Amino acid sequence: MAVKTKTYVKGLKDKTVDELKQDLVAAKKELFNLRFQNATNQLDNTARINEVRKNIARIQTVITQNQRAAQ
């Protein structure tokens, strides 16, 4: 993992589940907008789609870890 990724994940682990869910909704909206821009040939940085997809997965992973730790 890159340093930027490690700090991003560490920041996620410091958040509450509600904050993580808000971040998840925002990331999904961003992904939708990126896909829409890509379909209409307005997107310059197509690598951003994969980055957002991975961030969504990271957020979901931290949410699951927090829920399992609470049980």
Image: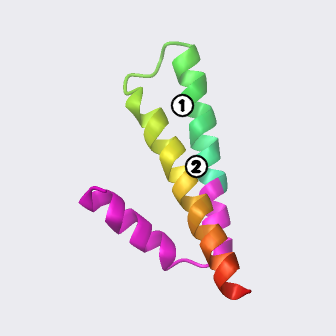
Name the outermost residue toward the top.
Answer: 41
Q: Quadrant of the C terminus?
A: bottom right
Q: What amino acid is at disc 2?
A: Ala
Identity of the residue drawn at 43% across and 42% down: 51
**Along the line of sight, the residue nearer the viewer: 66 or 17:** 66
* Element class at badge 1: helix
Q: In the image, which residues are magenta? A: 1-24
Residue 51 inside the magenta-drawn segment:
no
Which residue is denoted by mark 1 in the rendering? 34
In terms of sequence position, does the residue under pointer 2 or pointer 1 come before the other? 2
> Residue 17 appears at what percent x and percent y?
66, 75
> Residue 65 appears at what percent x and percent y?
61, 73
> Residue 25 appears at what percent x and percent y?
67, 53
Q: Residues within 10 Å of mark 1 (few under 14, many from 20)?
A: many
Identity of the residue drawn at 59% across and 33% down: 33
Cβ–Cβ under 8 Å for marks 2 and 1? no
Corner quadrant of residue 23: bottom right
Corner quadrant of residue 63: bottom right
Q: Is residue 20 above or below residue 68?
A: above
In this rendering, would 55 be left or right of 17?
A: left
**Along the line of sight, the residue nearer the viewer: 14 or 65:** 65
In this rendering, would 52 be left or right of 7?
A: right
Which residue is denoted by mark 2 in the rendering? 27
